[in-house]
Structure formats: structure tokens, C-alpha cells
Amino acid sequence: MRQTIQKVILLVLAGSICLVGCRRLPPKGQFTIDGGYRQVMGTFARVVAVADTEPQGRSAIDAAFEKIDAIEQCMSDYDPNSLLSKVNQQAFRQPVAINDELMTVLCASMECYCLSGGAFDITVGPVVQLWRQAKKNDAAPTPKQLEQARQAVGCQNLFIDTEGQTVQFAKEGMFLDLGGIGKGYAVDRAVEILRTAGLKGGMVDIGGNLRCFGTPANGAEHWLIGLQDPANDENILLKLKMDDRAVATSGDYRRFVVLDGQKHSHIINPATADSAQSLSSVTIIAPTAMAADALSTTVTVLGDQKGLGLIESITDVEAILIPHSEKLSFEKTSAADRYIMAE
Ligand code: ADP
Ligand code: MG
């Protein structure tokens, strides 16, 4: 039991942002129910409900997890029976019919591809696969392998027919990977479920992609989200106060592999087919979790200057970056401070 709990805590910390407690006496007739952590999408998810009654909160939490499971079944590239896998297997030969959910995520991915000048690219799948394999084999892919995989990368070869609701690939070997956006989408849909269930407030976190709304938990004034130190999980560097907002963190300091003395993270720069390396952690605050998720991956690829420039140009979105350096420092967009709690 103890071992299980330790494992859960470790993996949850791998999200690098977390809900932090601030307990007051909640008003009468208001219940905070913490659904705890459940394993989904290769990570852990947590749903918290603020409800009029405990049963209302519990059934909303179960419904939210059901939604997350359904989205995973549709969008996982690990599951050979998912709709995404069907697209990956068949879309070069013929257009493949997709559902509304996958259509929404593909269109948003395309938008982020254009916005980022190609830094965010869900067709990066073949390169991601090579690096995943490299981790297993403990040997870096050869330049020839990388070049070959890169041939199949590029959203310009992805055709999305919004009227016919189909998707098709223009190049053989293309492979979609929604790892940089799918969790955020699932968070948004789970929040929608909580709202529809009539909750006063709630929070959904999938592996560090988090969104909260309405009345904060336990009678607190705001939802408080802790930004963890890349160098030390137990150290909370900043507390973010949020209402009806989403926050996501990407970084290269936890999910990486060292091959031939070189560190490679799981976020790929499509231009080089190697990992993006300039930032230790990227936190994005946005109105939706899907935007926060995709943009945190994007800024990790773009680096601080281009990344901050991009986020400044998007209304209502802020960024907090931690560059690689001996001494801890932050780089922020101009209005990010409004979310940071003064000590
Ligand atoms: P995490 O999965 O740790 O929350 P991210 O949201 O940053 O981190 O997503 C990283 C995942 O996104 C990778 O594991 C891979 O599946 C996918 N990915 C990697 N590079 C890119 C990229 N340039 N554009 C879009 N998706 C990417
Ligand atoms: Mg992301």
C-alpha cells in the first residue's frame, strides 16, 4: 500500500504543477469531494468537485473520468484499436471518417501548427517513435533514420475535410501523435461534464494539464496551483491563483533519455528531428486546457525569445518560463504576474 502511494505521488509530481491546499471552513451546504488519482493516458488524473451534496459531487467525478477514458480510447496512439490508430493505419490509402472529437483536436492542432510556424506539429509521430525506440534500445537513432522519419513530417501533408468529416495523408509513413494536445482536450471535456452536472466548482488535472472553474475547493478564495521546482519536486516555486482558467507545464527535465552523453527530451523540434532543449520548464496559463497544453509544447520548441513573443501576441494567454541555468530564474509575459500569488 505504502509503495503504491509513493508511486502515485511521484507520478503526479511528474506533471510539475499541482493543486495546493488552503483550507478554510467551507460554507454550510457545500462539499468538496476529491476523486483522488486514477491512471489514464499514461499518467495520473485527478478530479475535484465542489457540490451541493456529496452524491452529486461523486457522480459528477465518475462521469468526468468516464469522459476521459472515452477520449483516451479514441485518441491514443498506443492502442491499436483507437480511432487515431485507424487513421494512422489507413489514411494514406483512403480518407478515413473521424468523429467530432477527433475533428476538433485535429483542427486545433492545425491552427497551432500555423500559429507556431511549424514548431507544433502532430505529424511529428515518426520521429517521436524513433526516440521512444532509442530509449528502449539505449542507442540514439542514426542521422539516416532521423532524416527518413523527417520526410514524413509536416502538417502540409495532412488533409482535413471538415465537411465530409474525414482525414487523409498525402505521404506514406505519416503518423499522428496527439501527446502534446490530447490531455488538454480531455481536461476541457471533463470540465464540461462537471459544469453540466450543476457543480458549484471543480478542477480536473491530467498529468500537469489542469483547469478549474467556479467556487474553489475547501472554502478557499481562489484555486491555488503550485509550480514545482524542476530541480526539486518537493519545492514549490510559485503559487498561481486562478479562477476559471487552465494551466499546463511542459519541460525536458523529467521525461528524457541520455544517449551518448547527450540529453534528449520527449518534445521534438520538427525542424531538426532532435529534442527541444533550451528551456527547463514552460508554464502556460490560458482560457482552455487544450490551448495551454498545445502552447506549452510549442514554446518548449520555440525557445524563450520566440516563445514569449508568440504568447504576448495571443490575448488572454500568459507564460512563465524557467531557462536552463545554474541559478534559478523566471522569464514571463507582461501580464503573468496577475496570476502569481505574492508571498
Ligand atoms: P507531456 O506529455 O509530458 O505533458 P507535452 O504536453 O509537452 O508533455 O507533450 C509532449 C508530447 O507531445 C510528446 O510526448 C509527443 O507525443 C508530442 N510531441 C513532441 N514534440 C512535438 C511537437 N513538436 N509538436 C507536437 N507534439 C509534439
Ligand atoms: Mg503540451
Image (tube, rainbow, N blue to C red):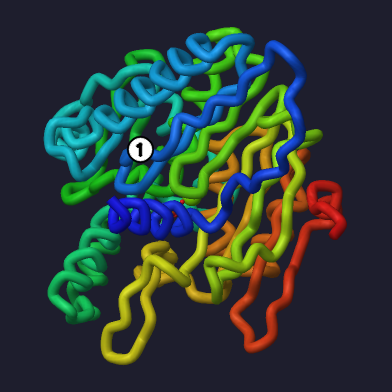
Give the x, y percent position of residue 102. 36, 26
**Can the viewer see residue 65 in this picture?**
yes
Residue drawn at (59%, 14%), measured in percent from left and top? 195
What number of labels is visible?
1
Give the x, y percent position of residue 18. 57, 49
Give the x, y percent position of residue 325. 63, 84
**Residue corresponding to mark 1:** 38
Residue situated in front as seen by the camera: 93 or 190: 190
Q: Is residue 147 left or right of residue 296?
A: left
Residue drawn at (70%, 55%), measured in percent from left and top? 319
Q: Is residue 141 above or below residue 102?
A: below
Q: Is residue 337 above or below residue 114?
A: below
**Can the viewer see residue 107 in this picture?**
no
Give the x, y percent position of residue 169. 25, 39
Residue drawn at (40%, 16%), measured in percent from left and top? 63
Residue drawn at (35%, 37%), measured in percent from left and top? 38
For badge 1, the amino acid type reads Arg
Residue situated in front as seen by the camera: 312 or 194: 194
Residue situated in front as seen by the camera: 142 or 42: 42
Q: Is residue 147 above or below residue 197?
A: below
Label 1's element?
strand
Any atom of ligand 1 within 8 Å of the CB at mark 1? Answer: no
Q: Quadrant of the C terminus?
A: bottom right
Image quadrant where residue 126 sits: bottom left
